[in-house]
Image: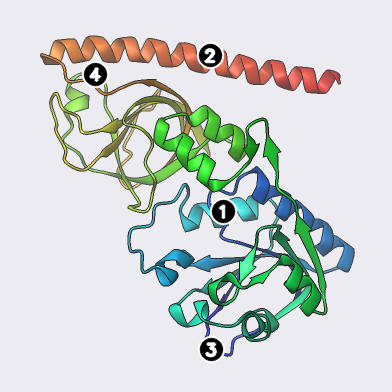
């Protein structure tokens, strides 16, 4: 993977011929994946490499001066997904107030013009230039290369969008979010030292430091997978304040990794959310909490058994067709 950073006041260019898609790609959902698929097709058509053009930071930080914009996925996650889906080059537009004030013509000539574009893929609602005055049609009429405009990708409830996915995540409806993402909703972070309260109860947990930009799911307990290196484990995950024994003002993200033994400190964990199990509760004592955790563990194993059976049945059905 090649990373190319383009800034308003620099002269850096991309000499490698590319076909690219452009957008912010928060969540890298099914709609975004259609753009990537088209980009890969065009790269093959023109005999060049594929690329994803994205913005860092979020354009709202420059346009509206927002300092606490929340996202479904981190920048690292978006890049990793793009590469997973076959993208060969990442073009990062360092988005500043100055870049936001470029006219549509200046954005095309001064920013996109520095890339050796053979084709560009965008969504039907893509806008660029000062106050978003440029759109997909003006782009198509202005540039000398092919522009492919992708229509909305819909499900039974309407257009799949980062906004709808965000709303689902906040409600704890991670199955709904995953259906629009096309993969299980994910969070990732680094395991840090906690107070080891769970270990003393027979439920050791990994205390995970997550990025502040995450839009956090609803407080409660979730059935998840935990990916550690190349291995995947079942996990009981809690997002909350731990009101019974270990109250934390900041929402904590903790995972009991089922079947894991060993040191997790300093390791990166990717949590893949399957379903919401229950809300966070404050218990009268430690024994009541342990009883609930034992029940949660039984429920989560049953939930994941059912989930894996559905996946297996669906795969078998697809193979038969």
Query: With respect to residue 101, does 86 lie above or below?
Result: above
Question: Which one is earlier in the sequence, the residue at label 1 or at label 3?
Answer: 3
- Estimate how packed mark 2 is, as few (under 14), some (14 to 19) or many (20 or more) residues with alpha carbons within 10 Å: few
Query: With respect to residue 285, does 180 lie above or below?
Result: below
Local SS, label 2: helix
Question: Which one is earlier in the sequence, the residue at label 4 or at label 2?
Answer: 4
Q: Are marks 1 and 4 in contact (CB under 8 Å)?
A: no
- Estimate how packed mark 3 is, as few (under 14), some (14 to 19) or many (20 or more) residues with alpha carbons within 10 Å: few
Q: CA distance from mark 1 to mark 4?
A: 35 Å
Residue 84 visible, this angle: yes
Residue 202's disc number: 4
Local SS, label 1: helix
- Estimate how packed mark 4 is, as few (under 14), some (14 to 19) or many (20 or more) residues with alpha carbons within 10 Å: few
| Left or right for 10, reference 317 | left
Closer to the observer: label 1 or label 4? 1
Q: CA distance from mark 2 to mark 1?
A: 28 Å
Q: Are marks 3 and 4 in contact (CB under 8 Å)?
A: no
Q: CA distance from mark 3 to mark 2?
A: 54 Å
Question: Which one is earlier in the sequence, the residue at label 3 or at label 2?
Answer: 3
Q: Nearer the viewer, residue 27 or 149?
A: 149
Residue 305's disc number: 2
Question: Which one is earlier in the sequence, the residue at label 3 or at label 4?
Answer: 3
- Estimate how packed mark 1 is, as few (under 14), some (14 to 19) or many (20 or more) residues with alpha carbons within 10 Å: few
């Amino acid at each position: 993977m090649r990373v190319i950073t383009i800034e308003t006041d620099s002269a850096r260019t991309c000499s490698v011929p590319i076909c690219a898609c452009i957008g912010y790609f928060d969540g890298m959902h099914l709609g975004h994946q259609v753009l990537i698929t088209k980009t890969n097709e065009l790269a093959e058509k023109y005999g060049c490499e594929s690329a994803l053009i994205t913005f860092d930071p979020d354009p709202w930080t420059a346009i509206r001066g927002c300092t606490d914009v929340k996202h479904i996925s981190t920048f690292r996650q978006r890049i990793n997904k793009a590469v997973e889906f076959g993208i060969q080059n990442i073009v990062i537009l360092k988005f500043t107030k100055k870049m936001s004030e470029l006219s549509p013509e200046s954005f095309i000539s001064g920013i996109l013009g520095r890339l050796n574009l053979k084709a560009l893929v965008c969504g039907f609602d893509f806008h660029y230039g000062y106050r978003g005055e440029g759109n997909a049609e003006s782009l198509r009429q202005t540039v000398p290369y092919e522009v492919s405009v992708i229509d909305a990708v819909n499900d039974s409830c309407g257009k799949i969008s980062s906004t709808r996915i965000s709303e689902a995540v906040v409600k704890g409806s991670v199955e709904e979010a995953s259906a629009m993402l096309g993969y299980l909703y994910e969070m990732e972070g680094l395991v840090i030292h906690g107070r080891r309260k769970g270990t003393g109860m027979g439920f050791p947990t990994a205390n995970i430091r997550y990025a502040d930009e995450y839009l956090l799911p609803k407080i409660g307990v979730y059935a998840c997978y935990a990916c550690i290196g190349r291995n995947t484990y079942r996990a009981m995950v809690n997002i909350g304040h731990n009101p019974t024994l270990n109250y934390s003002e900041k929402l904590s993200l903790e995972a009991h990794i089922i079947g894991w033994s060993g040191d997790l400190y300093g390791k990166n964990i990717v949590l893949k959310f399957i379903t919401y199990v229950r809300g966070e509760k404050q218990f009268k004592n430690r024994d009541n909490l342990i009883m609930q955790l034992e029940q949660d563990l039984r429920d989560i194993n049953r939930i994941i058994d059912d989930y894996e059976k559905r996946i297996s049945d669906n795969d078998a059905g697809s193979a038969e067709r």
